[in-house]
Structures are given as structure tokens and as C-alpha cells.
Image (spheres, rainbow, N blue to C red):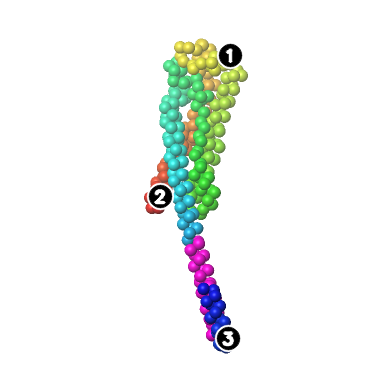
Amino acid sequence: MIKFFRKIRQNLLSEGKTGKYFKYAIGEIILVVIGILIALQINNWNENRLQQKQLLSVYERTLSDINNDIQEFTAIVKHHDSIEYIFKRVINDSITPDLFDVGLSRLVTANSVATTLNTTGVNQLKALNTNDSLSLKIIEIYDQMKLIIIDNLEISINNESENLQKIFMEKYDWYPEYMSKTIMQNNSSKELQDYFLYSKEYRHHVVNNYNSRYPNYVTSVKLSIKILNDITEELKIVLDKS
């Protein structure tokens, strides 16, 4: 094709048709530019198609991650619902020995929280560096969950648990007994039971721990479940259209 155009130009020059030659040259340049633009457009279309295919693949992984996180958050809420009545019995100063059998003595120390968010999909979205609004929304949600739930509330709750455990170790002779077995109402010393039944110190720690967990932590987890369920529906719509 290049040889063909070159031959035409040479013929025009040899025949002295300079005006026609320049017109032809300009036309040839225009054709080349158009060809380049078409090639660039096709290349851009192919790149966009590949990026969209990759994005949809990451969305599928993200959807799986979100479903796993919803399950974990749901389990956290279920667990806290199951022990809330013990907290309230202590807060309302209505403790009875039977509460030892359902975890009274370890209400604070044994109920640490440690959520592990599934962030493989989110990290892949970050790596894609896309301006897609749904991707940016998902990234923002996960950044906020990590900041508020894990880096703030969970650390605060676990610090309270560790501090109380340290107080037991440093102040009370019954600590070895406390650590050596599951405390029940019929298998523990009077000194140990008296502390958990009547101590204002313990009640104070339970009240503080309750206020960290239920109005703040559990409420945030429940809200996160709702938000993640909404995002799940958005992802399903996008994937169903693909």
C-alpha cells in the first residue's frame, strides 16, 4: 500500500502536476491521521473492555468478601445479644449465684472482640485505581469500618478487658483459682464469689464495658451489616447486567 501511494506521487511529479501532487499529499496525510485515530480508538476500546472485565472480576471477589463479613458481624451481634441480660443483671444490681454458671466472672475478661475484615477485593479495587463510583463507595465504607470498629471501638473494649485482668492478678489472692478453671457457682471459693457478687469495683467495670459495647460497638456493627447488605444489592445489579 505504501509503495502504491509512493508510485502515484512519483507519477504526478514526473508529469509536472505539482498542484495535484500537493492536493494528493494532503489527502494522504489526512488518510494517515484518520487511520491513526481509528487505531487509537480501537486500542482504547480494547483497553476499556479489559478494564471493565477486570473490574467485574474484582466485584465478584468483593461480593464474596462482603458476604463473609456480614456473617461475622451477624455472629458478633448474636453473641452480644445472648449475654446482654447478664450485663443488665449486674448493672441493675440483681446478681445471683446462678449467674456464675453462664459466665458472670468472665463477662468482661473473656468477651474480647477481634474482627478480621475480608479486604482482598477492596485492596484489588484500590490497586485498580478506578474512579468508578461504586468502587470508591466500597473503599470508603471499608476504610471507615476499620477506623471506627476495629481501630477504635474494639481496641477500647479489649483494653478494658486486659486492664481488669491485670487488676485481678495484682490485687486478689483468688486469681490463680480464677485462671485455673471455669468458675461455676459450686466449684469456687467464697472469697472469689463474694467479689463478683458484691464488689462495687467489678460492677463499675461491667458498667463501663457495657457502655463501650452496646450503645457504641454493637450499634456500629448492626449499622455496618445494613450498609453492607445495601452494597451487596448494588453489586448484584452491576454483575447481573454484565
Q: Is residue 59 above or below residue 117?
A: below
Residue drawn at (57%, 15%), measured in percent from left and top? 176
Give the label, 2 or 3, closer to the camera: 3
Between label 2 and label 1, give the one nearer the viewer. 2
Structural distance between the alpha carbons of marks 1 and 3: 113 Å
Which mark is on residue 14?
3
The spot of residue 189 in percent (x, y) is 51, 11
Q: What whole-number distance in Å separates the C-alpha atoms at marks 2 and 3?
A: 63 Å
For residue 173, which numbered disc appears in the image? 1
Labels 2 and 1: the sequence-earlier one: 1
Residue 13 as seen in the image, left or right of residue 226: right
Q: Does residue 77 show up?
A: no
Residue type indicated by callout 3: Ser
Badge 3: residue crowd in 10 Å (few <14, some 14–19, many ≥20): few
Return the residue at label 2. Answer: 239
70 or 184, nearer to the observer: 70
Describe the element under mark 1 as helix, strand or loop: loop
Q: Residue at x 53, y 45 (%)?
A: 123
Q: Is residue 197 magenta?
A: no
26 magenta-colored: yes
* Residue appearing at x 55%, y 84% in the figure: 12
Q: Could you tell me which secondary element the residue under label 3 belongs to?
A: helix
Q: How crowded is the residue under tag 1: few (<14 C-alpha within 10 Å), some, or many (20+)?
A: few
Q: Position of residue 141 (x, y in %)?
A: 49, 44
- Classify residue 161 as left or right of residue 232: right
The overriding secondary structure of the stretch rendered in magenta is: helix
Mark 1 and mark 3 lie on one chain; the one further toward the N terminus is 3
| In the foreground, 2 or 92 | 2
Image coords of residue 35 (percent x, y)? 51, 70
Foreground pick, 123 / 133: 123
